[in-house]
Image (cartoon, rainbow, N blue to C red):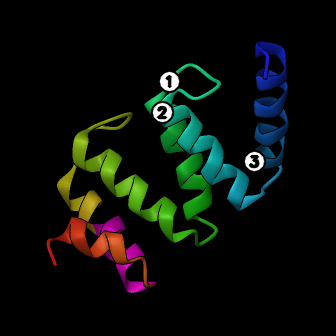
Amino acid sequence: MNESNKQDKFLLLKEKADNGNAESQLKVGEMYENGVEVDQSYANAFKYYMLASEQGINEAHNYIGLLYQDGLGVEKNFIEAAKYFKKAADNGYKYANNNLGF
């Protein structure tokens, strides 16, 4: 896939995310966090993860916890990290239990 097609794919996905599609918000957050088809930006990753989290996406809760834990895109805050890990774990996201130490 050439660079133009990759950029078009990202822009279409971002448009869906900006229009409220939770799965697209999660994917755009992952793309920003990992620098896939877009410049890496933890702040933008946090923004899109938060949008997905507000719609109940458990994986997004967990990713927000990781960003808080590591201070990536937000100020390091272990209390906030634990809050989001617990939210994900309470809703059955098994990886969040590992992050909580269980």
* Residue 96 higher or lower than 71, as above or below: below
Q: Secondary structure at mark 3?
A: helix
Q: Are marks 2 and 1 in contact (CB under 8 Å)?
A: yes
Which badge, 3 or 2, comes first in the chain's sequence?
A: 3
Q: Tell me where the magenta segment starts and ends, as one range.
A: 83-91
Q: Secondary structure at mark 1?
A: loop
In the orientation shown, which residue stands out farthest toward the left? Answer: 101
Q: Secondary structure at mark 2?
A: helix
Which badge, 3 or 1, comes first in the chain's sequence?
A: 3
Q: Residue at x 44, y 32 (%)?
A: 42
The residue identified by callout 2 is 34
* Residue type (three-letter) at the residue carrying disc 1: Gln
Q: CA distance from mark 3 to mark 2?
A: 17 Å
* Residue type (three-letter) at the residue carrying disc 3: Ala
The residue identified by callout 1 is 40
Q: Residue at x 75, y 48 (%)?
A: 17
Is residue 78 covered in magenta? Answer: no
The residue identified by callout 3 is 17
Specify few, some or many for label 2: CA neighbours under 10 Å numbering under 14, 14-19, or 20 or more. Answer: some
9 and 16: which is toward the camera: 9
Indicate left or right for 97 with 49 as reference: left
Q: Residue at x 54, y 43 (%)?
A: 30
38 and 48: which is toward the camera: 38
Q: Are marks 3 and 1 in contact (CB under 8 Å)?
A: no
Task: Judge depth for marks 3 and 1 and give the one in front.
Answer: 1
